Image: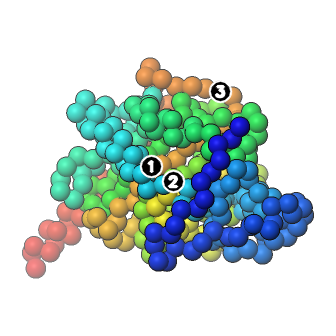
Amino acid sequence: MVAQLSPHPPHRFDDEPAPYDESELLTMSPLGARDLALKLPLTTRFELRDDITPLQFAFLDLHGFLIFAGVLRPDELSMILSEMARVERKLIDEDITSVCGVPVWFALDPDGNRTVQRMGFSSYYSDKLEALVTDARFEPVRRLIGEDARIGTREKDGVVFNSYINTPTSLRPNLGWHTDSLRDIAYNREMPGPMLNVGFHFDRIKPEDGGLRLIPGTHKQSAWPMLTRKLHFLDNKEDKDEVMVETWPGDLTLHDGRMWHRVKASPHVGAKSLRRSMYVPYVVDRYQPKDASTKTNAYMLVLDAVIKTKAMLKKRKHKKLLKATRKR
C-alpha cells in the first residue's frame, strides 16, 4: 500500500499560490485532461496525491515537467540540510574529492571557508537521506515512468545536492543549456529511455533570482536536435521558448532529463544568491550501479574541466576589476 499523503501544508509565504484545484477532475478522461493541460499556464502548480492525476499526467506528457507545491514539511527540510552539513564536513575533513566516480565541486563561501557546491551520490553517506528519497509516498512519481522504473541512488550521478552561492570562487555561476541525454549516452553508449529528474527545493527563487529554465516539449525531440540544438554547457543565452521554474521551500519538481534545460546565474552576490536543490534520478535503462571503486568517466572529466575553467576565468575577471578599482 502507498502511504497516505498528508494534506497540503499551510502556505508559509504571502506570495505562494495554492496548487491547482483538481478535486472535481480526478476521473476526467485522458482526452479531456489533454485539452485542459493545453490551456493551463506553464507555471501551474499541482498537489502530489496518492496517484498521479489524469491532468498531471497529460501536463507532463505535453510539456515535460511538473511542479508539486509544498511536498516536504519544514522538519524534513531541516533534516536534509542538517545531514548535508554533516556530510560536507566529512568531505572537507577527509579531503574526499569524488564520490562513486563523480567529482565533488568545492568553492569558498563569503567568509572564505571551503564549502561544497555540488555533490553527486549525496545519500551515499546518509541513511536518513536515502530513506527519505525512497519513501513510499513518492511511489506515484516512480510509476510515472513505469512499473519497472527505479530510483537511481547508486546510478548515474545518484542523489545530487546543489548549494550555490555567488562569490568570486563559485565553481558554477551558471550552467549552460544541456540535456542529460549526452551524459546517458556517455554512460551507456545507447540512446536513453524516459528519465525523470526529481528535484526538491529549499529556497524561494523568483524569476529575477536566476534558477532553473526549461524548454517545454523538447523531451520528445529526436536524437539530432537532442544533441545539436545548442552547444551543451557553453550556450547560456535566453531562449524565447524557455520557462522559469519558480520555487518555494518544500516544492518538488519533475522534468524529463531529455529536455533542454539550464540554470541561470543569480545576479545577486553573497547570502542573497543562495540556491539549494536536490535531484533524484528515476531511471529505466540498464542497471549500472556504482560504488567507491568506480572511476570517473570521460564525460565527467570533461564537464569537471569545463566548470573549473569557467570558474578560473570568473576569478581572474574579478581580480582585474578589483585591481582596476584600486587604481582609480
* First in sequence: mark 1 vs mark 3: 1
Quickly name the residue at label 1: 76
Query: In this rendering, does residue 74 appear at all?
Result: yes
Q: Residues within 10 Å of mark 2 (few under 14, many from 20)?
A: many
Q: Quadrant of residue 85?
A: top left
For the N terminus, which image quadrant?
top right
Q: Amino acid at mark 2?
A: Leu
Nearer the observer, 139 or 97: 139
Is disc 2 placed on a helix, strand or loop? loop
Q: Position of residue 78 (x, y in %)?
A: 38, 51
Question: Mark 1 and mark 2: span between their CA atoms?
Answer: 6 Å
Q: Amino acid at mark 1?
A: Glu
Q: Residues within 10 Å of mark 3 (few under 14, many from 20)?
A: few
Q: Quadrant of residue 109?
A: bottom left
Q: Position of residue 307 (x, y in %)?
A: 40, 49
Task: Look at 30% across and 53% down and name the residue there.
Answer: 312
Is 31 on the left-hand or right-hand side of 260?
A: right
Q: Position of residue 101 (x, y in %)?
A: 45, 30
Is disc 3 placed on a helix, strand or loop? loop
Do labels 2 and 3 touch, CB within 8 Å? no
Is 242 on the left-hand or right-hand side of 193?
A: left
Question: Mark 1 and mark 3: span between their CA atoms?
Answer: 29 Å
Q: Amino acid at mark 3?
A: Tyr
Quickly name the residue at label 2: 72
Do labels 1 and 2 touch, CB within 8 Å? yes
Q: Position of residue 75 (x, y in %)?
A: 42, 51
Task: Look at 88% across and 67% down and name the residue there.
Answer: 32
Quickly name the residue at label 3: 287
